[in-house]
Image (spheres, rainbow, N blue to C red):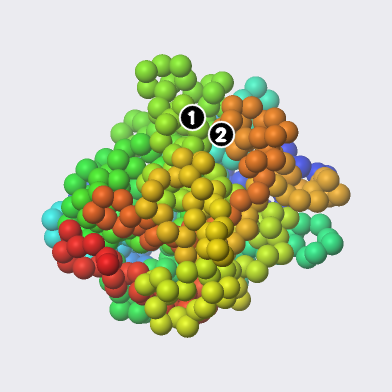
Amino acid sequence: MDPLKGYFRAGPRGADNPVAGQYFEAASNNPGEAQIWCYTDRFSYAPGDSLTLHVSSTAPVFSLRIVRDGLNPLTMFEKGGLEGHFHRTPADCSLKGCGWPAALELELPVIWRSGVYIVTVSMVTDDKRTIEHDHLFVLRARPGKPTSPRLIILTTSTWLAYNDWGGSNHYEGLTGPGGDQYSPEVSTQRPWARGFVRLPAEAPHVPYASAPGGPPRYPHMEWAHANGYSKKYASGGWACRERGFALWAEETGLSLDYATQHDLHFMPELLDAYPCVVIVGHDEYWSWEMRDRLDAFVEAGGHVARFAGNFYWQIRLEDEGRRQVCYKYRARAEDPVRGTPDERFLTTCWDAPEIGRPAALTMGLSGAAGIYAGWSRCAAHGSGGFTVYRPGHWSLEGTDAGYGDVLGAKAKVFGYEVDGVDYIIRHGLPSPSREDGAPEGIEIIALSPATTVEWGSEAYPDEAFIGYDDARIVAEALYGEATEEAIDKVSRGVGMIAEYRRGNGVVFNAGSCEWVRGLEAKDEQIVRITRNVLERFSSKGQGTKPA
């Protein structure tokens, strides 16, 4: 069977390299093709809220199952014999939403626990095949009644930026004069692409696949292409990112409450009941309002435990959160706030001078300091771990790590996108240079090199995925023009583990998308550091400040 049935392909980078080209999952407007899809009206709910499910099915009846995900997934709701209807899907569904009518509404019981709930709709074809589609929603704790001192903020803005269901996201797409450009706006009102909600255990991750002397390899995209999954599954989504952390926390006995970045944007009170906020995986896209909420939380004495990478783009949420806007490197030419009193909301790199709010002011680190490691030929053959410079830091207690030791190399915890700041080394110890606008209060614990350039890509023009494109983008964002000097400045960088003290609070930042791989591999040092941070930051006293 063709694994790309139900997919379309367009615009391959090279005739012999369809993996690096565009292919995506989409509904067919042929009612004779067996298919079923769904999405919820919102990303998250509180217990007692009403959930609206939108379904398009070519079968007259379908079944619904809702499972709370975890070490032992628990079925919470099942119902069969639901009336199915086929609905046409507009070509611009990725941008404007699918517009399908409501199939059913369900009041979420107040006794359901905070967590991630997987929604599966299924139908049986005339030839007795079962076809399923998975979606998810997040259930928050009851307002003012947390069940854990730790609130994990799921990176839904990044998930949305990478979701290519329907053909367009913030990376590739069907927009622009030639119908082949990424879209500056994407909609929440559509299904998640396959791989964002569930993944088989054998699905490969991103880093460290390119052998020295050979062309770059992309095993996760090769696997996705061969098995009918979104090639962006390894960049964003519950299945590949936060889920591994959640399972580790559950197994370890560390409880979590759940919320989304969209909740953080619209709910100023969201963090009030928690001493510790946890961020995991890939949190590339943030709104001004999200940063405001987190900054105020830290200033007031809150603790942020961040095990994530690539804090980089500003976004705007519009239409009550149903639409996400990010013009990225076209912002200076196309974003309508350019040159207006609202220019600080320009949807480009946070470190761009028009915004005036460097990323490091919130997280202590920035994605503009190097970005890639172990991805394609960007720092492709490094250690895969963080080199320790301050072994006496409290987060390393019990790890037996010494100066110059490397943390997490076997599990490849360093990659594929990382965060850092410009730094200098004196007497063998790194400190922020502050030439890049990094604030006071940052202590660098460990670091490793990263880059925005795919070194040696000239030898493999058809296989290159990044080349020098990202270096040009960063140079334009930071310096206004991609001159040779500017590109050289941004081509080399670093990822770091750092502590950032702001006001009465603290941010611990393990600035790497792949930190969770160390937890999944049960790397003793990565596990101990993570526990040290979570246990220290989870004090019930909101105003307490780690020593």
Q: Residue furthest top?
A: 340
Picture quadrant where residue 172 is located: top right
Q: In the displayed structure, would residue 266 be above or below residue 111?
A: above
In the rendered image, which quarter contains the C terminus? bottom left
Work out whether residue 221 or residue 31 is closer to the camera in this orientation and state it.
Answer: 221
**Taking 65 as reference, is 400 left or right?**
right
Q: Residue at x 38, y 68 (%)?
A: 246
x and y percent of residue 181 in the render? 63, 32
* Mark 2 burial class by Cα count in 10 Å: few <14, some 14-19, many 20+: many
Residue 478 badge: 2
- From where the camera sits, is residue 69 visible? yes
The image shows a total of numbered marks equal to 2
Whether pointer 2 and pointer 1 mark residues with C-beta atoms closer than 8 Å, the reply is yes
For the residue pair 150 and 99, the one nearer the viewer reads as 150
CA gap between label 2 and label 1 equals 7 Å
- Of mark 2 and mark 1, the one earlier in the sequence is 1
Q: Residue at x 17, y 58 (%)?
A: 543
Split into 4 quadrants, where in the image is the N terminus? Answer: bottom right
Rendering coords of residue 449 (x, y %): 63, 58
Q: What's the amino acid at mark 1?
A: Pro
Q: Residue at x 30, y 63 (%)?
A: 115
In the picture of the structure, the residue carrying the numbered disc 1 is 353
Disc marking residue 448: none
What secondary structure is found at the residue carrying circle 2?
Answer: helix
Mark 1, secondary structure of its residue: loop
Residue 486 image point, x, y percent: 66, 35
Q: Identify whether 399 is placed above or below 269.
A: below
Residue under the image location 36 percent in, 31 percent down: 318
